[in-house]
Image (cartoon, helix red, strand yellow):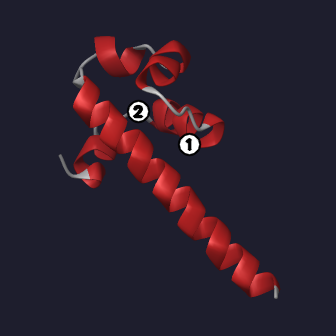
Amino acid sequence: MNILVFLCNLLNMQLSVLGNLCPETIGEALSMVPSIKTRGQAHDDYAIEKMLNDLSDQKIQISVILLCNLV
């Protein structure tokens, strides 16, 4: 599943919590935001894990860009 399609199906609150707290596992993500599995467009574990990995990759890329701008 494309990360953009997945993220478009999340509510802003859900995405904000996941993006700020950076859960590393599906269990952590579901503990923080159970509605990603239970409300509306329920997502399977594979889609949630892919989204967590993609969010982590994006945060790393943004951090590198910010660090490069400070140097």
Which residue is labeled 1 in the image? 19
Horizontal placement of 40 versus 24: left or right?
A: left
In percent of width and height, residue 8 lies at 30, 45
Q: Residue furthest left?
A: 1
How many other residues sit within 10 Å of disc 2, few (<14), some (14-19) or many (≥20)? Answer: few
| Gap in angstroms between the C-alphas marked 2 and 1 | 12 Å
Most foreground residue, 41 or 50: 50
Residue at x-position 32% and y-position 42%: 50
In percent of width and height, residue 9 lies at 28, 37
Kindly indicate the quadrant of the structure image that contains residue 21: top right
Residue at x-position 40% and y-position 52%: 54
Indicate the quadrant containing the C terminus: top left, top right, bottom left or bottom right. bottom right
Kindly indicate the quadrant of the structure image that contains residue 37: top left
Residue at x-position 71% and y-position 84%: 68
**Mark 1 belongs to which amino acid?**
Gly
Horizontal placement of 64 versus 56: left or right?
A: right
Which residue is labeled 2 in the image? 11
For numbered disc 1, what is the local secondary structure? Answer: helix
How many other residues sit within 10 Å of disc 1, few (<14), some (14-19) or many (≥20)? Answer: some
Most foreground residue, 38 or 25: 25
Q: Residue furthest right?
A: 71
